[in-house]
């Protein structure tokens, strides 16, 4: 698959997701330290977010890029979050009701707004 601008933007989304998850973890660690209420719920949430953040590695991002390049040019772009975090392949769909810059994952239902040149 060509469209290197789209690939670059999707990789940025993966990297930004890791930053967001780390921020969520910091908030939860603080909440856990400050409160004795709902400790089990907070611990469960922390475990889930830690696992998600740990799955975003340079190796997985490189595998995503390799997979991207193996696709034919007429194939829909793969969802970066499903591929990297969940280890699944799911196509992104362009949203016809919106602009060419809006995509939605069939699997995780995540919306992506990706400003592309000429879109």
Image (cartoon, helix red, strand yellow):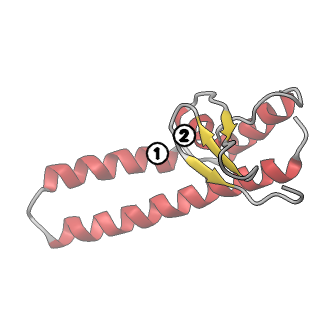
Where residue 8 appears, as percent x and y from the top left, is 79, 53
Where residue 10 appears, as percent x and y from the top left, is 71, 50
Where residue 68 appears, as percent x and y from the top left, is 79, 35
Q: Is residue 23 left or right of residue 86?
A: left
Q: Label 2: how many residues lie within 10 Å, few (<14), some (14-19) or many (20+)?
A: some
Q: Earlier in the sequence, mark 2 or mark 1?
A: 1
Q: Secondary structure at mark 1?
A: helix
Q: Secondary structure at mark 2?
A: helix
In the rendered image, the vertical position of residue 41 relative to residue 20, given as above or below: above
In the rendered image, the vertical position of residue 91 relative to residue 48, given as above or below: above
* Residue 105 - label: none
Name the residue located 80 percent from the left edge and 50 percent from the top edge: 6
Name the residue located 82 percent from the left edge and 57 percent from the top edge: 116
Looking at the rendering, which quadrant does residue 92 occupy? top right
* Quadrant in which the N terminus appears: top right
- From the viewer's side, name the closer residue of 19 and 103: 103
Looking at the rendering, which quadrant does residue 2 occupy? top right
Q: Label 1: how many residues lie within 10 Å, few (<14), some (14-19) or many (20+)?
A: some
Name the residue located 53 percent from the left edge and 31 percent from the top edge: 107
Residue at the farthest left position: 37
* Residue 85 - label: 2
* Residue identified by numbered label 1: 52
Where residue 42 appears, as percent x and y from the top left, is 22, 55
* Quadrant in which the C terminus appears: bottom right
Name the residue located 57 percent from the left edge and 32 percent from the top edge: 106
Query: Marks 2 and 1: CB-CB under 8 Å?
Result: yes
Between the C-alphas of marks 2 and 1, the distance is 6 Å
Q: How many marks?
A: 2
Looking at the rendering, which quadrant does residue 16 occupy? bottom right
Q: Is residue 23 left or right of residue 119?
A: left
């Amino acid at each position: 698959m060509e469209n290197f601008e789209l690939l670059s933007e999707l990789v940025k989304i993966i990297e930004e997701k890791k930053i967001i998850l780390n921020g969520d973890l910091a908030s939860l660690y603080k909440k856990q330290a400050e409160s004795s209420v709902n400790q089990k719920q907070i611990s469960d949430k922390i475990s889930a977010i830690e696992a998600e953040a740990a799955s975003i590695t340079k190796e997985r991002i490189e595998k995503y890029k390799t997979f991207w390049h193996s696709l034919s040019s007429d194939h829909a772009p793969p969802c970066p979050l499903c591929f990297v975090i969940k280890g699944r392949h799911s196509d992104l769909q362009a949203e016809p009701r919106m602009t060419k810059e809006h995509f939605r994952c069939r699997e995780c239902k995540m919306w992506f707004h990706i400003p592309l040149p000429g879109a």
